[in-house]
Image (cartoon, helix red, strand yellow):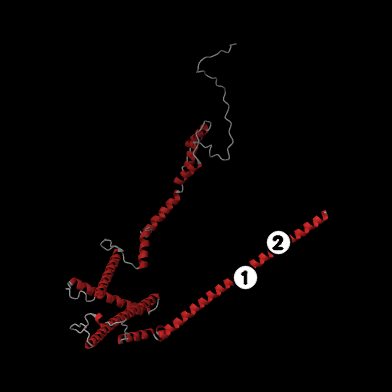
Amino acid sequence: MSKPGFAFGLNTAKKLGPTKPASRSRPVAFGGDDDSDDSGAGGEARAMGVEVIGEEEADLRTKSKSKSTRIQPPNLKPKAKERTSALFGDLSSSLTSRKHAQAAQEVDPTVYEYDSVYDSMKRAKSGAKDDVEPGGERKPKYMQGLMRAAQTRKRDALIAEETKVAREREAEGDEFADKETIVTEAYKRQLEENKRLKEEERRREEEDAKRNKGGGMSAFYRRFLDKDEERHAEAVKAVQERQATTADDEAETERDDEKEEAALAQELNAKGASVAVNEDGHVVDKRQLLKGGLNLGGKKRGAATERQGQQQHAHHGSTRAGQTGLGGKKAMWERQSRMVEEQRAKTQKRRLEADDEMRRERERETKSRKTEEERLQARERYLARKKAAEEAKGN
């Protein structure tokens, strides 16, 4: 009987015993993870519709059984499988849709040209012309309108400048009437063109007003502005007429004064005084007309002053005649006098009330002072009687 010996070394051979048959494992409910790569490939092959027959199918089964006992790497995730099946699956539907698309294009080649069809529909709806000419050159869409608007603004600016210059010339009057004026032909043509454009604008506005029958807020504001301009023009005209009348009246009054001074000088010279008079009959030194005393001479109201008063009276009307005349001044003085008297009476009344209040306050203070003195005297008498009673008891 041989003894067991010890073997030294790394390459020790093991005795192979009889191998037990591999127990058949139960199928798992969710067996997707137990499938091998080959089985997955076979499943994919089945998904692609490939059929394996004969010995190849037997070999595939044998290989899958032999590899099931080995340690296998982790399989693909379900998402990857789903993605793979989505990439290679549903080929029949894609082929069907491609056939339908080809058939539709045979019937109508423009069936999928959505943009061109939509553009043609929009152009037909708006009635606009095509921006592309038959020759293929594209035309600007908005530039012509912008250029017309710029020309209109430039024309309006020129008209406004012309109106401003005309007003300045009118304000200057005859100040530069003796100066030479140079007007070019281009400026004349420009003035004629501006005049023509103004006339066209006025005619267009009249036609618009007739078409609108004078309705709307724009017509209302236009009439309001026109009335305001008319009132302003009337006021300016009245002021100018008044200034002209005042200047004429002052000149006439000055002439009357000069005539009076000349007549007075002649009268004084006739009496023996020596008053210097020039060739025109005007007094050279008006101090020579003065006499001894205050020289208070009441000036007579001239015809110009009377005429000015009549114009003012007619301008203000009969409703304001009492206010601007002597009666109106008298009534105003009386009203102011009454107001002053009322204020004076109120001030006097407040002063009397304040004096009465101060007098009553002094009386109350005096009375309270007397009451306090009487109370102190009564207390002193009580204390004296009490002291006398205690002394009597002690004795």
Quarter of the C terminus within the rendering: bottom right
Disc 2 element: helix
Q: Residues within 10 Å of mark 2 (few under 14, many from 20)?
A: few
Quarter of the N terminus within the rendering: top right
Answer with the quarter of the image where residue 156 lies: bottom left
Q: Nearer the viewer, residue 92 or 363?
A: 363
Residue 86 lies left or right of residue 195; in this view the side is right
Question: At 44% from the left edge and 45% from the top edge, which residue is drawn?
Answer: 87
Label 1 vs 2, first from the N-terminus = 1
Q: Residues within 10 Å of mark 1 (few under 14, many from 20)?
A: few
- Mark-to-mark CA distance, 1 and 2: 24 Å
Q: Does 180 sit above or below residue 246?
A: above
Viewer-nearest of labels 1 and 2?
2
Disc 1 element: helix
The answer to whether residue 124 is seen in the rendering is: yes
Q: Residue 51 location in percent, x, y?
A: 47, 42
Question: At 55% from the left edge and 75% from the top edge, which residue is drawn?
Answer: 349
Residue that mark 2 sits on: 376
Residue 360: give its label.
1
Residue 42: give its label.
none
Q: Residue 97 location in percent, x, y?
A: 43, 53
Q: Nearer the viewer, residue 375 or 6?
A: 375
Q: Does 301 sit above or below residue 79?
A: below
Residue 361 lies left or right of residue 237; in this view the side is right
Count up the numbered dots.
2
Q: Residue 264 location in percent, x, y?
A: 25, 86
Residue 82 lies left or right of residue 189; in this view the side is right
Q: Nearer the viewer, residue 130 or 347?
A: 347
Question: At 44% from the left edge and 81% from the top edge, which residue is drawn?
Answer: 333
Disc 1 residue type (three-letter): Arg
Q: Nearer the viewer, residue 237 or 353?
A: 353
Answer with the quarter of the image where residue 136 lies: bottom left
